Each structure stands twice: as C-alpha cells, then as structure tokens.
Amino acid sequence: MATKIGTGVVLAALALSAVLWAPWWLLAVLLGVVVVGAQIEFLALPGRLDRTDKAIGAIGGAAVLAVVLVGDQAGIGPRLAGTLALASIGMLLGVLARPGRIEDAGIRAAQLLAGMLYVAFLGALAMLLVRDERGVDGRYAILMVAVVTWLNDTMAYFGGKLMGRHKMAPRVSPNKTWEGSVWGMFGSVGGALVVRALVWPEASLAATIGFALVGGALGQAGDLVESLFKRTFAVKDSGGLLPGHGGFLDRIDAFLFTAPLGYFWFFHWFQ
C-alpha cells in the first residue's frame, strides 16, 4: 500500500507540473510516449504476436499519434482517418505476408487492430487537447479530465474498501463494487468543481458537473474494459514499470475513454 500511494503521489505531481507549466511540445511528447508505451504493453499481452508484429503495431500507432500534432487544425480529421486506415491496412498485410500458423493469423490481426483502435486512436483523440491552438484552455481541459478520472479511481478504491458490498462486474473485476462506484462519482464531481474554482472559472457550472458525471462513469467503464482484456490474457497488470501501479496502460485505461470525451465536450458540444 505504501508503495502504491508513494508512486501515485509522484505520478500526480509530475503530471500536474507537466500540464500546467511544461512547454506545449514537451507536454505533447510526454503524452505521446505514455500512449505508445501503453500500446506496446497491450501488444505484449500474452498472445500470439511475435517481435515483428509488435514493431509493426507500434510504428502504426506512433504514426496515428503524430498526425494529430502536425499540420493545420482544419485538416486533422481527414489526416487522422487516412493514417488510421493506412496503418490498419499495413498491419493486415503484414500478417498476410507472414501468416505463420494459420490458426493464429486471424487472432494476431485482431490483436493488432485492437491495439490500434483501443490505445493509439483513443490516445490520438486525447492528444487533440494539447495542440497549441487550444492554448491555456487545452491545458485546463486536460487537467479537468485527469482530475475527474484519477479522483474517481482513488475514491472508488477507498470507498469500495470501506463500504463495498455489491459486486459491479464480478467476472471482469471481482473487487469493484457499486458502493465504490458511487464514491468514485463523488470524487469526480468534487474534483471537477475544484479545478473550475481554482483555474478555469470560464467553464460553465452545468458543463463542468455534466462532464464529471458522464466522464466519471465512462472512466469506470474504461477501467473495466482493460480488466476484460487482462482477464482474457490471464495477467494481473499490463506491465511492471510503475511500482504498485502496473504499467502505462493500467494508469491510462480510464483516461483513454475520458480524454476524447473531454475534447468534444468542452470544445465542440459545450464550448
């Protein structure tokens, strides 16, 4: 527990410092490294992918991330769609050119495409928040997303430990409870209101609370989705780089769901 809390405090301090004060390009690079690292962890889950498959998948994911950071903002949609399509085709052709054991070929292709869509594509949408055009509002939005996501996770953990009785999804994540989920939602709403009060008063109160509720629920779903994959591959954590916290994917599983929502919520739906 002490290791888990200590690592969490260090990660939170580093993330907060980067979001508030790091140059735009450094923040983008750091986020990109984390997302690519998470995709590599996903591809490394005990399956049938070999070293070449993993390299092809990582290159394709990095290309999808890079395309949202270059060029003018107006052309992001077509660039992202085109790169995603070409990368996906490249992965499928890579498996076709080296099918290996034919019973495994389709599973290899499916895992590559899942890594592309689940980690790289959602991560690319998250990185739209740190484009320079967003300015300080982009930083505040990503801070809002992070606080809503991670306070939800923290409060759900301690709430479940203290009061958890009714299992939420026992076959997917046996330790998660509905009581913990409710605690997590209180954490999301409280965290969002604090961010609004301290740094982003321009965000409307209704939009802030709405995002906290929808984003908090979606973050919990994102956590369960990763648990589903880990159960399938029979692993406890996606990696071991972060003491007490597993790997990159374990830390951003919920963020991959909430950050794209935050982008559309604050910059398109409720500006």
Image (spheres, rainbow, N blue to C red):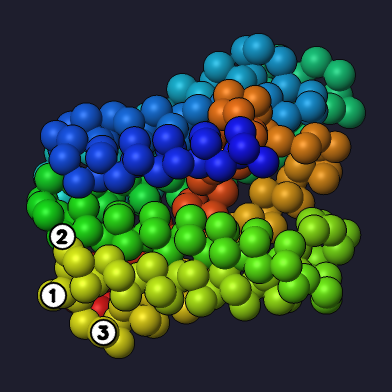
- Image point (83%, 43%), residue name: 232
* Mark 2 / mark 3, whichever is N-terminal: 2
Mark 3: few/some/many CA within 10 Å (<14, 14-19, 20+): some
Badges 2 and 3: C-beta atoms under 8 Å apart? no
Residue 262 horizontal/vertical position (percent): 35, 64
Q: Is residue 26 left or right of residue 104?
A: left
Residue furthest bottom in the image: 206
Asked whether residue 255 appears in the rendered view, the answer is yes
Residue 74, given in percent of the width and then of the height, sits at 15, 54
Are circles 2 and 1 on residues that touch, CB within 8 Å? Answer: yes
Q: Which residue is mark 2?
A: 137
In this view, 72 is above or below 270: above
C-alpha distance separating marks 2 and 1: 9 Å
> Which one is earlier in the sequence, the residue at label 2 or at label 1?
2
Q: From the image, state whether disc 2 or disc 3 is nearer to you.
A: 3
* Label 2 crowd (10 A; few <14 / some 14-19 / many >=20): some
Q: Residue at 56% x, 58% y: name it.
A: 154
| Mark 2: amino acid | Asp
Q: Which residue is mark 1?
A: 202
For numbered disc 1, what is the local secondary structure?
Answer: loop
SS at mark 2 in the image = helix
3D distance between C-alphas at marks 2 and 3: 16 Å
Task: Determine which residue is flagged by label 3.
Answer: 205
> What is the crowding at mark 1: few (fewer than 14 residues within 10 Å), some, or many (at least 20)?
few
The foreground one among 122 and 21 is 21
| Type of amino acid under label 3 | Leu
- Outermost residue on the top side: it is 51
